[in-house]
Every structure is written in C-alpha cells, then in structure tokens.
Image (cartoon, coloured by chain):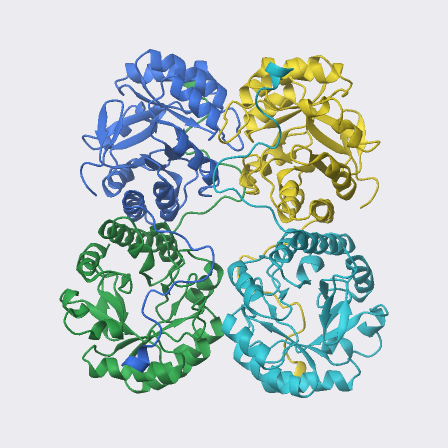
Chain colours: A cyan, B yellow, C green, D blue
Amino acid sequence: MATDDVLKIGGRTFTSRFILGSGKYSHELISAAVQQAGAQIITLALRRANTGVDNILDHIPEGVTLLPNTSGARNAHEAVRIARLARELGCGDFIKIEVIRDSKYLLPDNGETLKATEILAKEGFVVMPYMYPDLNVARDLREAGAASIMPLGAPIGSNKGLCTREFIGILIDEIDLPVIVDAGIGKPSQACEAMEMGAAAVMANTAIATAGDIPKMAAAFRKAVEAGRAAYLAGMGRVLANGGAASSPLTGFLQEA
Amino acid sequence: MATDDVLKIGGRTFTSRFILGSGKYSHELISAAVQQAGAQIITLALRRANTGVDNILDHIPEGVTLLPNTSGARNAHEAVRIARLARELGCGDFIKIEVIRDSKYLLPDNGETLKATEILAKEGFVVMPYMYPDLNVARDLREAGAASIMPLGAPIGSNKGLCTREFIGILIDEIDLPVIVDAGIGKPSQACEAMEMGAAAVMANTAIATAGDIPKMAAAFRKAVEAGRAAYLAGMGRVLANGGAASSPLTGFLQEA
Amino acid sequence: MATDDVLKIGGRTFTSRFILGSGKYSHELISAAVQQAGAQIITLALRRANTGVDNILDHIPEGVTLLPNTSGARNAHEAVRIARLARELGCGDFIKIEVIRDSKYLLPDNGETLKATEILAKEGFVVMPYMYPDLNVARDLREAGAASIMPLGAPIGSNKGLCTREFIGILIDEIDLPVIVDAGIGKPSQACEAMEMGAAAVMANTAIATAGDIPKMAAAFRKAVEAGRAAYLAGMGRVLANGGAASSPLTGFLQEA
Amino acid sequence: MATDDVLKIGGRTFTSRFILGSGKYSHELISAAVQQAGAQIITLALRRANTGVDNILDHIPEGVTLLPNTSGARNAHEAVRIARLARELGCGDFIKIEVIRDSKYLLPDNGETLKATEILAKEGFVVMPYMYPDLNVARDLREAGAASIMPLGAPIGSNKGLCTREFIGILIDEIDLPVIVDAGIGKPSQACEAMEMGAAAVMANTAIATAGDIPKMAAAFRKAVEAGRAAYLAGMGRVLANGGAASSPLTGFLQEA
C-alpha cells in the first residue's frame, strides 16, 4: 500500500484501516491481536479501561489510538456522561458513540446518537457515531460535527456480514466523511468487500474473538482490509452482464501451429 | 502465513496460492503483475509461448512454474496434441486442460476434458483440468490421474464471482485433490471467500487485466488470497441465526461506575 | 386462501394483501391494473386526486380504499398539511406519510415521518408511515399511533428487491403492527419472498408500471403475494445445511424388483 | 393465464407448469396435493407404483400424466431397465431419467444420464432427464432426443433454492427444449423466480412434503409458478443501477396547491 494513502480522523493520520474491537478477548490476547491486525485504533468499553489490578490499557501497545465507546448507554444523556468520564480518565478525545436500547438485536438508536454527537462535538470530542445506515441521519451526523460515521453491516456479534450492502454504498457515495463499517462483519472476505466498495475502514471484534486461532484471524483481517483498499484504489474491472470473454487466444490455434 | 502451509502439486511445493493467468496482459505488464501477485504458477496459452521475437517466456521471472494451457482445443484430441507440443517446446510437464466447444459462454467440456486427462496423466503429465464443477466428473478426473481440479466460479472473463459457490463447497468436501477456483473471479473479496471455504488456490486473469492499475490489483489479489487462507486455517467463528450478541459489557455500567 | 385470513388496518378488513401504487400509470391503465391485481387499497399522490377534468379518482373501482400519500412533503409540517388537505378533499382518513428530503435516493426521513405520525394519529387519521426499516424508529412509530409500518425494500422505483431483507425480518419479529413492504420490489418473486417472511402486505408501483404488459404483471403480483401468504401460513420446510435427502426410495430397488 | 400459453412435451399439452414429486407423501395426501397444486404431471418412483394392496396409482386423479422416474438407478443400464419395466407395467411412455451414484449429495451422473437418454429416446420414450446444469451436456441431451431437460436448483431434498441460478439462465438462453427446474426448490418464491427467468416449469417435492400444511403449500406453489410465468410473459421492468426514481410527482407540490 502506498504510504500516502492515509486515513485522517480528528487530526490524526492512520496508515491502518482496520479497527479492532476489544470487547471479547482475554487480556492476554489483545496485544497479540493488535499486533497481528496492525490496528492503530482499538475500541474498548469504558468499564474495561477501569478495572483495577489488571487494566486492559496495560495490554495495548504504544502508538495505538484508544477509541473508548459508550457501550451501556441507553440514551444521549448516558452516552454524554460516559464520554466525559472517559476523557477525565485519560482516554483522550476520541469517542465512539454507541446508544442501544434494543437488547435483542442491539441496534443503535440513531436519534439519541445524533443528540449525543451534537453535544460532544461542541465539547471538542472527535465523535465517531455507531449508526444504523440511514442516509438522512448520516447527513445530520455530519452537520452535527461527527468526524466519521460507523454504520453497521449486521447486528453486533452476529458475523452475518454486509446485510446493509446497498445502503453502505449509498453512504459512501453521498457522505463526505470516512465511512467505517462497524458490526456484523464475520469474515475477512466481507471486510475486503466493504473496502472494495470504498469504505474508509472496517471494524471487527466478534469475528476475531470467535475464531479458532485469534492472532491468525487478526492477521487475516489485516490483509483482507489491505487487499480491499488496494483493489478500490486500483479500480475494479467491468462485470459482464452475459456470456464469457476469452482470456486467451482461442481460435485458429491448431491451424496455425 | 506459516511457511509450513504449502500447496503440493506434481511433486512441487508452492507457498503462493494465487495463480496468475497471462492471457490479457501486454508483455511489459506480466513481470510486474507476477511480482506483485507473488505468483509461483503462471498459465499461458501455448501460442503466446511461441511467437518469435518478443517471447512471453522472457518476461516470466525465474522460479515461476509455467502452466501451459490447451486453450483453443475443441476436443480431447486437440488438447492432447497441444499438451505434447508444449512439452516438446520445453514448457515442462504441467498442463492445464482447457477444452471448450461453446463459443458464447466458453464453458468447459467435462467429457472431453476427462478423456484428455486420462491420456495425458498416463504420459506423465501433471494434469490440471479446468472443469465445470460437477462432483461426479471431479471423482472421475481424480480416478483418471488429475493432479488437481480447477472448477470455474463463473464464465471465463465475466468477473461475476463465485456463482458456483454451493458446488465448489461440495468439491472441497468430497474430492481429495487440491481444488483451485479458476475463471470468473472478479474481485479480491471473491478470491478471499473461495479460500475461506477451503479452496487450495485461486486463479485470476481478467479481474487483474481489466483493472485500472494492474500491478496494484495483482497485489490486492495476493493479499486477499493470503487472508482467505489464514482465515480458513484459523477457523471461522459461528454465525448467529437471529439477534445480536453483545461484544462489550452493556448492562449495569452506569450504576456501577 | 381461507377467507378468515384477513388484514385489518384502521378498522377496515381486507382480503387482498397487495397494495397498488398509482404514480406511474396513465389513467386508462389504472382500473385495469386494480382489477388484475385484486388490490383493495390504492395509493395516490394528492395532486393526482385533484387535477380537474380527467380526475384519477374516477378511474378507481368501487370498494377500493384510497390511501393518499404525502408525496412532495419535505418535512413533517408539509406532510401534515397535505394529509389535512386530503381529508378535506374527501379522500378519507387513511394517509400514507411520505417525507423525503433526499432527491437522489428518495429515502424517507424517519425523524420527520415520526413527527407527522404523532400529530396525525392524534387527529384521528389512520397513519401508515413509509419508513427506512430502523427497528427503534418502528417502535417509536407504533408508540405514536401508527396503524401499520411501511418499510422500504430498496430505493423507490429501483426495482432492486429486498435489499433490506435482514431488517424487514427483524421488524416482522418485533413490531406488533402490520409490516407492509413498500418501495423497491421489482419482481413478483420478491413480493412472494417478503410474504413468506411474514410481511402483512406488499406494495408495488414501478415494477408494474415499467413492465411490458401492465395488466398481466399486475395479475402476476396478485398471485405471487397470495402464494407467499399461503406459504407463510402453511409453514416452511426445513433447509438442509449440507448434503441432499432422498425424496424417493433410492436403494435396493433393482434387487427387489 | 391465457389458455394459449401451454407447455408441450411428448405430444401432450399442459396448461399447468408445476410438476409434483410424490416421493415423500403418505398416500392420503397425494390426491389433495395434486388437486391443490393443479399439477398435470406427477413423478413417482417405480417401486411406489407397484406395491400391491394400497397402490399409489389409485390416488392419482384422472387426467394427470404419470412421469415415472428411474430413482434407484446407479448407471445407464439400470435406468434403461427401470424405464422398460415402467412401460410394461402400464405407466406409459414418459420417463424421467434419474441416475445417481453419489449417496451424500445425490447429484445426477450426467454421463450415464446421457447414455440412457440416447437408448430410451430411440425406443420411443418421452425422455426427461434430471441433470446437473452443464450447458455442453444439455446440448448433448438435446441431440440424443430428450424431450426436455430437468436441471437441478440445489441438491435433492435440500430446500436450498436456485443455487444454480446463473447456469439455469444459460440453459434457458441456449437450449431449445423446455427447461424444467427440478430439485432443491424450497420455497414458492424460488419457483416464481425460476419461472420469471423463463423456465418452462418447476418441480417440487420436499418443499411441499416438509411444509407444515401440505395442501396449503401445494396451493402456494401453484400460484407462485403461475405468477412467475405471467411475469415472464409480461416482460420485467428495468432495474436501476443507482439511485431511486420518483413514482409520484414529488416536487413543487405545495407551491402549486
């Protein structure tokens, strides 16, 4: 990947386009996973940043940007409170807004997410809202000062992949912010496809945490994301509507030989 | 990728699982594409190996295994004749059988392919038949001495992807030979998916040749194939039938904080 | 179809589960299409109800429930204004809320749609909001007094089908209101699939209007919707994860014969 | 459906395009299913036609064409033997060739099927071969005298649907015989889609036999097949590559009102 293809968010520059979620790993696996995934951003729930003796923060390598999330918030008010607490605890200005009031499908509440984004962007946070991929809401989030949008591919933890493909594509076309696909991505090929479509980055957590070999799956995601990005930059070939097209000289060979 | 994960075909050992087709490149681009793709096997139509002044063979790096194909053959007899000619010309023992009598969809003739495989395997060739992914024929090809099978994903040159997904999966389950997906793969994500399913390797030609930036797309395919292989070896996580599954501690956070 | 399987909305009972949009037909075709589709509800933009000499209302058969929509509204205020005007013009109490501020993809504005729903439900309208299939918003619409929800399958007029399949399924599971798939359905098979999933009804307009033979396509949609409903009521058979299952006695036949 | 849209096979004319497989029903259910499905052709394994006291033939309504299949045959020889026996037993000239040597996936053996077709067509049978959807083999079957081809959608009994979609489409384009999709169709919407693509008919067995309510599911398949046929004849509307298209007058409404 050319080093001049960088992702800029909140004044920082990233060469990695894979974001690792930390929610389901044992502490011992996190640094291994971060290293294999080449991740420069790692999300974590605030509670995990703050658990006394064996602090998860100790397991995150130097130079990785922490992206605390507001997991556990059921409305804008709670999300704002968690964000402020994260900053006080030294987690920095980046915040992933996650407001969920649906306990079965864990789908984000776009309305409350928008409210929290407005408040926190004004307070100088680098706000990265997790969202249901609704174009109108994405426009409002941009107006409200979001630094990126993080639409879901499928319900959190489902490993179902790009169920929102059509609408992620619309967001990429229409929204002038980095579009980071977050939630539901279950296989490296799905992360690769999102990147081919023009996503700025992909986040995964459960896909890696539920794999048989966590560090190896982290490495697989890294390469798949890089592959998809390179393909996007290279420009995809056309797809035929019908028929085939010879890739080798098919006719006349034997006559001429 | 662990160096002990190798692909063995015809007594040779390959660490790359991406096979490059050469049919559509200008000569100047081939060495660049081979290098970027990390390919250790490259297919080419015999006519391209034999065109006087600017010989394509001069553009293929050292150490790459040549896989001449029988492109142009319309039946087993012609395929056998081309294979023998390739060996005489110094192209080695590897031969990709390609018998096509359908000029619109360019679909392989499984029956003639089987006949050619029987003959050429007995003559000591390392026979890699391009085939329509029919389980019964795959079994017959194995009995006939094929060194691998190369089922199509979609019509040649179509870039349509894994249209035969269900049946490629059956071949991988049932056939004790390397299954190499050949034809139709149009995007790195599709190559990655084939590898996640357990394919031994993937071949692409048109997807790279029709890309905007050929070397960059070659590099993308390399990484995607490596990603898919790593994911297969790592073991995929489960996919939820319904609902979501929290990846972070969602409940009780605020009460406890 | 058993006559006791009825769809109830706003105190009325319908035996048809196909809703016809009138936006793209010439007047002469509407009554033919309604008859062939067996539709008991037909939507129309208010402007079409109100154009002097050749009034579309004259072309709608007796006994069909008119569902005026607020097409043209860019916010809740405009939608409310159109709804009230429709009632004044004698179009009845049914109203389909359609608030669109995105002129390229024509995606509904869920926030404004919710506001309009709250106001109009209080005024005694039978409110049927066209919506982007967001579970949290669907819950809010129900709370606000919606009589049904009308999530889209794909952008209006695209004929792309059930791109929101995963999320329509979630709405059907979770929302205790008739879920009517509206927009994007391009083929009878897609309408059938939506019904198999448990949708209460399907609406189509462009799929019929752009067909070669409008009355015949209307008849096709009618049967497809009835087929899907019957299948849903019958209960689908299981899908095998792997392998096949003999449907006839395969073994031992010849020995015994 | 216009009565002049008929399916002709072996000199007979059918107005129904749904073929019912009888392999998995109790005898009592067969006549109900046939009636609900409106089927004019019903397949059955020869053994079922010949079991003494409670003969399945007694449960098949008048006027239905019997299509005995060669289920149980593992090669052409056995299939030919079963076909001749069926004719001797009074089952008529129609014969569905089914040659299977793969006991896990139950995929047809195209090579043996072709041999049996050649022999039986010469003996005056109306030969309807069940096949793996390989274009070259389909051409050979036509040459050999097949009266139709019956490509599979997915493994028998799997209810997986149109996994061979791409290749069924090629057969419909290229083969000048009725293409009847047989095996794997699990839902009415899938049968409808096959018909929309231009299939001449669809067969189902397991999808109905494993449904909760067999007669109701049979009725659902009947309507879905009729819907798909009507849509095919009507001519499908275009699908947008991007964006939406207004189906109602969206702009300027309020200003003019």
Q: A59 or C256, which lies in front? A: A59
Q: A228 or D157, which lies in front? A: A228
**Height in image: A229 above or below B136?**
below
Q: C220 or D115, which lies in front? A: C220
Across and down, in percent, residue D179 comes to: 36, 32
In the picture as drawn, the residue positioned furthest to the front comes out as B53
Residue A113 visible in the current orientation: no
Across and down, in percent, residue C241 comes to: 53, 44
Across and down, in percent, residue D210 comes to: 39, 44
Residue at (58, 34) in percent of width and height: B152
Residue at (39, 83) in percent of width and height: C76
**Height in image: D46 above or below B153?**
above
On screen, residue D197 versus residue B73, left or right, reads left
The quadrant holding residue C229 is bottom left
All told, the count of numbered labels is 0
On screen, residue D195 versus residue B184, left or right, reads left
Residue at (64, 28) in percent of width and height: B149
Dividing the image into 4 quarters, which one contains the C terminus of chain C?
Answer: top left
**Height in image: A27 above or below D37?**
below
